[in-house]
Image: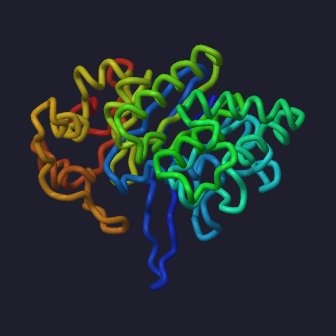
């Protein structure tokens, strides 16, 4: 359904330098699959999602191939991309405070999607809005409430509702549990589960640093580090036996797995080490890791960017 091949996203800086946010990223999502993209802050997860949706600023330099149902998204005119994004691709942004219209009630913003994207009449749109917000544990009063009167977690749930108001072929959710407590997070997980049951062919791309969320809802996991997808594998394998050293370090940093900190810091955008981008922090690095960038290697049904899995 969605194929991302050799995606690169760069930004020009004020001093005429260029910084790379996403580098040679590859990711493929089939219909009916939920893929979680995880990684530390600044790894390029959200930038990749925005590039797929055509929501990056004009200053972004995007190259590569992004194909959705045989349509090359990077080549679409803005008006066609906007129409596709509103009907067949849904995007749930993470910045709840910036993404909601402060001059409209929360219910009005959700109902607008039913009215203009699904052709529902006013009363049917209002009914569907109340039902959807209720399933996200938002009280009926939220329908007539303006965004600035809600907590960050409640605003985030309104954004989730707006993404789910249509039944898209592809749903991209950027940090859908950001600012939500553990109890409300479970409700969002349950809602995604019900969405999967109602729309078994819908593909879902969840961008998150919440590894527990990824474990609960994903069929596959893609790991990003310093702008690169360093591993893409089945969720079961990832949580039982991850391949990339960075993937292992991420899991070992979880409290229930030892709370071991990852040594060092991630490279700043535009200041990337030679060779493998993770080698300065990797306990298994060799001289080759510091000299040469590893290729993407196939290992069973997984893909991993690491010299340890390169064929001779």
Residue ranking furthest to the bottom: 15
Viewer-side residue, 198 vs 241:
198
Picture coordinates of residue 172 (x, y %)?
57, 39
Q: Residue at x 56, y 56 (%)?
A: 149
Q: Which residue is drawn at 67% across and 35% down?
A: 68
Q: Which residue is drawn at 62% across and 44% down?
A: 142
Picture coordinates of residue 89 (x, y %)?
68, 38
Q: Residue at x 60, y 60 (%)?
A: 56
Horizontal side, residue 76 vs residue 43: left or right: right
Viewer-side residue, 72 vs 47:
47
Q: Is residue 312 visible?
A: no
Q: Give residue 160's quadrant in the image.
A: top right
Viewer-side residue, 212 vs 82:
212
Q: Is residue 284 visible?
A: yes
Horizontal side, residue 105 vs residue 49: left or right: right
Picture coordinates of residue 61 (x, y %)?
58, 64
Horizontal side, residue 66 vs residue 246: left or right: right
Viewer-side residue, 175 vs 12:
175
Picture coordinates of residue 92 (x, y %)?
58, 44
């Amino acid at each position: 359904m969605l194929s991302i091949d050799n995606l690169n996203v760069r930004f020009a800086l004020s001093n005429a330098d260029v910084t790379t946010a996403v580098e040679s990223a590859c990711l493929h999502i089939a219909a009916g699959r939920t893929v979680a993209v995880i990684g530390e802050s600044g790894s390029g997860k959200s930038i990749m999602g925005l590039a797929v949706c055509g929501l990056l600023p004009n200053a972004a330099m995007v190259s590569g191939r992004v194909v959705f149902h045989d349509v090359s998204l990077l080549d679409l005119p803005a008006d066609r991309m906007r129409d596709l994004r509103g009907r067949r691709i849904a995007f749930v942004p993470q910045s709840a405070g910036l993404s909601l219209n402060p001059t409209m009630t929360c219910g009005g913003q959700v109902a607008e999607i039913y009215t203009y994207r699904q052709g529902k009449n006013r009363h049917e749109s209002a009914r569907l809005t109340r039902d959807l917000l209720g399933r996200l544990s938002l009280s009926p009063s939220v329908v007539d409430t303006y965004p600035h009167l809600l907590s960050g977690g409640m605003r985030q749930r309104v954004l989730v509702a707006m993404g789910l108001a249509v039944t898209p072929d592809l749903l991209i959710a950027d940090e859908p549990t950001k600012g939500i407590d553990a109890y409300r997070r479970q409700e969002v997980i349950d809602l995604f589960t019900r969405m999967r049951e109602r729309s078994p062919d819908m593909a879902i791309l969840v961008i998150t640093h919440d590894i527990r969320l990824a474990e609960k809802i994903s069929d596959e996991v893609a790991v990003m580090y310093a702008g690169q997808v360093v591993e893409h594998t089945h969720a079961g394998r990832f949580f039982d036996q991850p391949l990339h050293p960075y993937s292992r370090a991420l899991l070992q940093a979880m409290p229930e797995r030892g709370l071991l900190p990852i040594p060092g810091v991630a490279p700043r955008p535009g200041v990337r080490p030679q060779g493998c981008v993770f080698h300065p922090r990797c306990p298994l690095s060799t001289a080759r890791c510091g000299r040469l960038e590893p290729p993407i290697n196939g290992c069973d049904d997984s893909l991993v960017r690491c010299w340890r899995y390169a064929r001779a």
